[in-house]
Image (cartoon, rainbow, N blue to C red):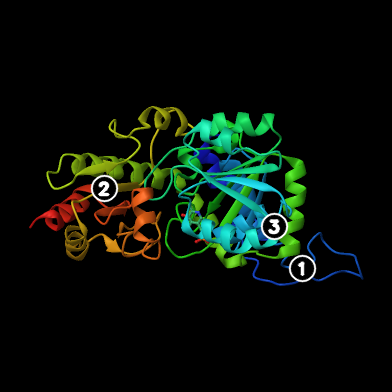
Amino acid sequence: MGFSTDAVHAGQTPEPRTGAVITPLFQTSTYAQKGPGEHTGYEYGRTQNPTREALEQNIAALESGKYGFAFASGMAAINTVAQLLKAGDHVIATENVYGGTYRFFTKIMEKFGLRLSWVDTSDLEAVRTAWRPETRMVFVETPTNPMLVLSDIEQIARLARERDALLVVDNTFLSPYFQRPLELGADLVLHSTTKYLNGHSDVVGGIVVTRREDLAERLAFLQNAAGGVPSPFDCWLVLRATKTLALRMRAHAENALRIAQYLHDHPKVERVLYPHLPSHPQHELALRQQKTPYGDSGSGGMVTFFVPDFATAQHVMRRLKLFIVAESLGGVESLACHPASMTHASVPPEMRAKIGITDGLIRLSVGVEDVDDLIADLDQALRE
Ligand SMILES: *Cc1c(COP(=O)(O)O)cnc(C)c1O
C-alpha cells in the first residue's frame, strides 16, 4: 500500500463488536480472565494495550519497518534503545544531537559504564577514526538541531554492518514522510512523536521501529520490563494525527522552502540554513537521502537563519506576532526559538560558538498557516 493509505489504515480495522470505524480508546489497566491464566492475550496495561498496538503498527508501516514500540516520551524511547547495550560498550554519537540525548548519555548512561564518542557524523572518516573494538552502536541524528547538518545514513549503515554495530537514527526532524532510515540500512529508527508525528503540540511521546525480529524481541522485553509506556489516550491522539502526516508534511515543507527563499534574499539576514536551498553545503545529500515515498524530496519545516547580533535577534523575536516564541517544533502552528537565550542558554558561549550557535541565530518551526501571512510577520519583525 502507498504511504498515505498506510497512514490512514495501517494497524487499524473497524472494531468487531460495534463496527466503530475509529480504533477505540482502551483506557484500562487490566483485563478480565475467564479462569486463572485463561486470558485473551491481554493481561496487564503496561504489557499490552490494543490502542497502543494500533499506533505501533501504524508507525511501523510508515517507517517501512515491521515492529513498533511506543513510549511515554522521545527520551523514554532513547533510554530503552540504550538498554540494548551493557557496561563497557562504546557508542559513536552525532555531536550536536538533541540536548536531552546528550544529557541522557553523559549524565546517566556513562555512570553505568557506557562509553561515548561525540563525533561529526557528517564526516565518514571521523566515524571510522572514532571506531573501537567495543563499538556496539552508532547513534545518528540527521538533520541536526539547529544547524541542520546531514549525515549519510547509507554510508554509515554499511560501516556499522561490516563491524557488527547497530545503527540507530533519530528521525524526529523529518518524519518518515521525508526520510525512512530503515530503507537506507539503519537497524532502528526512533522519534519523539511529540513533534511531527503527533503534530498538534498536545502530546509528549516516543516510538522505536525496527525490521529485525531479534531486536523486536529484546525491545518488547525492555518496554515491559523498564516500563516507559505511553498512556492509551496519548496513543489514541497520535494515531489520530498520523492519518494526516503526508498532508501536513507537504504543507510544512512547501511553506518552509518559501520562507527560506524569502530570508535568503533579505538584506538583514546573513545566512539561511535549509537543506533544500542550493546554498546548503549538503544540498546534494539532501536531494538523495530526504525522499518522500513518491520519489520527490524535501526538507520538512525547520529553517535556521542568522541576523547580525544578539540585539537584532531579540528585536526580531519580540516583534513576531504570528510566530509563537516557544521551544519544541513540528506542530501545525509556527514557532520561533532563539537558542542562545532559550534551548541552549545553559551551553557555555565557547561551546555554542564551536557548534555554530551564534547570538544572532534564530530557528523557525514553520507551521501550516498561509505562507503569505507568515512571510508578512517575518517582514514586519525584520524591519527597524
Ligand atoms: C524533542 C526531541 C527528542 C526528545 O523527545 P521528548 O518527546 O521531548 O522526550 C529527541 N530527539 C529529538 C531530535 C527531538 O527533537
Examine the rendering and report whether any part of residue 47 can be seen.
Answer: no
Q: Label 1 vs label 2: CA separation?
A: 49 Å
Q: Nearer the viewer, mark 3 or mark 1?
A: 3
Amino acid found under the numbered disc labelled 2: Phe
Amino acid found under the numbered disc labelled 3: Gly
Is 358 positioned to the left or the right of 284 in the image?
left
Residue at screen point 50% across, 39% down: 121
* N-term-proximal mark, 2 vs 3: 3
Mark 2, Cα crowd under 10 Å, few <14 / some 14-19 / many 20+, is many
Residue 165: image location, x then y, percent = 68, 38
Q: Nearer the viewer, residue 265 or 37?
A: 265
Q: Nearer the viewer, mark 1 or mark 2?
A: 2
Amino acid found under the numbered disc labelled 1: Tyr
Q: Quadrant of the N terminus?
A: top right
The numbered dot on residue 369 is none
Q: Nearer the viewer, residue 262 or 131?
A: 131
Residue at screen point 23% across, 61% down: 322
Q: Secondary structure at mark 2?
A: strand
Examine the rendering and report whether any part of residue 281 can be seen.
Answer: yes
